């Protein structure tokens, strides 16, 4: 048992992708950091050669930022997929909307990265920089004022810091301890994720289908390009249909995935096991509580259709760091005016993303004939070159 007090500039609770990235960014900005997690992410086997069922689409700007942290260079580029274009199919028979990186004079629309690979790279950088970590350390209590935060661990260790970041996921312990309310909505959907080898080359094209199942429920299927003619799929379907699909044999499940994607890439071969995740919308209007700041899923959880979950979390950290860098020499990093500015900025970005993801979900979930005509007209209109360029420019700016 240790009753000594550890003093640092920044305490980060949660060693997921956003928490690890925040630790590296804060350290490189010149602040002393301690990263805490009730589990030990370094104990997870990140070296298995099998493709990880969980993947992330990382925007070009966030990939560049991870490069500035010295993290992107640690990835095995032979296992990173590149999206050079995207095809979007509606529920009518018209040709897909095709968005190409070249429409905005860009090299790509983003990258497809395995969760375990990104986690391993971030852990390596945390270790190489000598950032303080307290893994396998459960938190017990928080005391927050506008001047500092005191965190008490289960072993009675006390940590006092100027700033505390809650990066501990959608069920955030930090958020609960601070009694920060959230608004939640279940999509009554489950995301099925899996990897497949393809008969035909994917040509670095991401493909997405908006449709309805036999019961009229919304279905969103994404095929994301990985190297070696491999794709990762994210299939968001009603929970009832997900149970049915998961009960199928591998061969029959593969046939369903092929059929839902119009056999665009020929025969598919399932690689490894599938994984499932319930889909929910969760947000809070309170990003800052005195000197505590919520980042990542602790602050917001959106539908995965736009692949923006982890990008949104990284942008939380980027904005916080930029605001702190702009402070005067007389301001503390937890100065209320700085944190209010952060909250305003992140709330606006989150609301924009919610309009995109939740709005698209609602639009394509509707069976109303008039709405169906409008959405498919909208997809047709999107094929106009000026609109396409604008969409691509916005996508790579995320």
Image: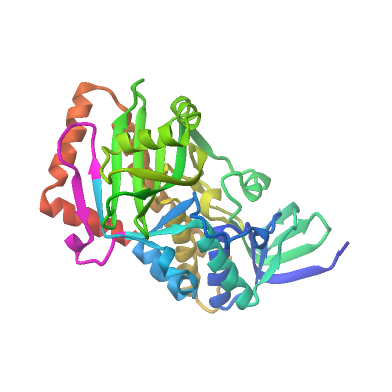
In x, y percent, where is residue 386? 12, 54
Task: In the displayed orientation, state which residue is furthest to the right.
Answer: 1
Task: In the displayed orientation, state which residue is furthest to the top.
Answer: 215
- The quarter holding residue 146 reads bottom right
In x, y percent, where is residue 221? 35, 39
Q: How is the image coloured?
A: rainbow
Q: Is residue 10 left or right of residue 60?
A: right
Question: Compared with residue 242, is residue 271 higher up or lower down, i.e. above or below?
Answer: below
User: Quadrant where the C terminus lies?
Assistant: bottom left
- The quarter holding residue 292 reads bottom right
Q: Is residue 166 left or right of residue 109?
A: right
Question: Compared with residue 233, is residue 333 higher up or lower down, i.e. above or below?
Answer: below
In x, y percent, where is residue 270? 43, 44
Residue 94 inside the magenta-drawn segment: yes
Question: Compared with residue 187, is residue 151 higher up or lower down, i.e. above or below?
Answer: below
Question: Which region shows up in magenta?
Answer: 88-109
Q: Is residue 114 visible?
A: yes
Say which of 199 and 26 sits in front: 199
For the point 83% across and 58% down, the residue is: 155
- The quarter holding residue 236 reads top left
Q: Is residue 344 visible?
A: no
Say which of 347 and 260 sits in front: 260
Residue 146 inside the magenta-drawn segment: no
User: Quadrant where the N terminus lies?
Assistant: bottom right
Say which of 346 and 85 sits in front: 85
Q: Is residue 215 left or right of residue 239?
A: left
Question: Compared with residue 130, is residue 235 higher up or lower down, i.e. above or below?
Answer: above
In x, y percent, where is residue 8? 69, 71
For the point 28% across and 63% down, the residue is: 108
């Amino acid at each position: 048992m240790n009753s000594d007090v550890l003093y640092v500039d920044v305490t980060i609770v949660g060693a997921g992708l956003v928490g690890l990235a925040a630790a590296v960014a804060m350290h490189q900005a010149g602040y002393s950091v301690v990263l805490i997690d009730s589990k030990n992410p370094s104990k997870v086997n990140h070296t298995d050669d099998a493709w990880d069922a969980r993947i992330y689409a990382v925007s070009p700007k966030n990939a560049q930022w991870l490069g500035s942290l010295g993290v992107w260079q640690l990835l095995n580029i032979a296992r990173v997929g590149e999206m050079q274009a995207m095809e979007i199919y509606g529920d009518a028979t018209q040709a897909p909307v095709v968005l190409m990186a070249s429409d905005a004079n860009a090299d790509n629309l983003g990258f497809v990265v395995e969760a375990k690979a990104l986690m391993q790279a971030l852990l390596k950088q945390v270790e190489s920089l000598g950032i303080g970590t307290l893994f396998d350390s459960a938190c017990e209590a928080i005391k927050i004022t506008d001047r500092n935060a005191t965190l008490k661990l289960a072993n009675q260790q006390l940590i006092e810091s100027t700033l505390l970041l809650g990066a501990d996921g959608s069920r955030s312990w930090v958020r609960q301890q601070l009694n920060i309310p959230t608004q939640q909505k279940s999509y009554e959907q489950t995301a099925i994720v899996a990897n497949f080898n393809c008969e035909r080359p994917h040509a670095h094209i991401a493909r997405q289908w908006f449709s309805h199942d036999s019961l009229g429920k919304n279905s969103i299927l994404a095929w994301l390009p990985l190297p070696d003619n491999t794709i990762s799929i994210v299939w968001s379907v009603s929970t009832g249909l997900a149970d049915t699909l998961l009960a199928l044999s591998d061969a029959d499940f593969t046939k369903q995935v092929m059929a839902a994607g119009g056999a665009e890439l020929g025969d598919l071969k399932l690689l490894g096991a599938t994984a499932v995740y319930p889909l929910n919308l969760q947000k809070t209007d309170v990003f800052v509580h005195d000197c505590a700041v919520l980042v990542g899923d602790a602050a917001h959880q959106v539908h995965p259709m736009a692949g923006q979950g982890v990008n949104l979390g990284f942008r939380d950290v980027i904005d916080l760091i930029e605001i702190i860098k702009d402070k005067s020499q007389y301001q503390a990093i937890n100065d209320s005016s700085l944190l209010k500015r952060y909250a305003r900025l992140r709330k606006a970005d989150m609301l924009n993303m919610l309009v995109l993801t939740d709005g698209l979900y609602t639009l394509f979930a509707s069976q109303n004939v008039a709405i169906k005509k409008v959405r498919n007209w909208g997809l047709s209109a999107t094929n106009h070159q000026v609109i396409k360029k604008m969409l691509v420019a916005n996508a790579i700016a995320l």
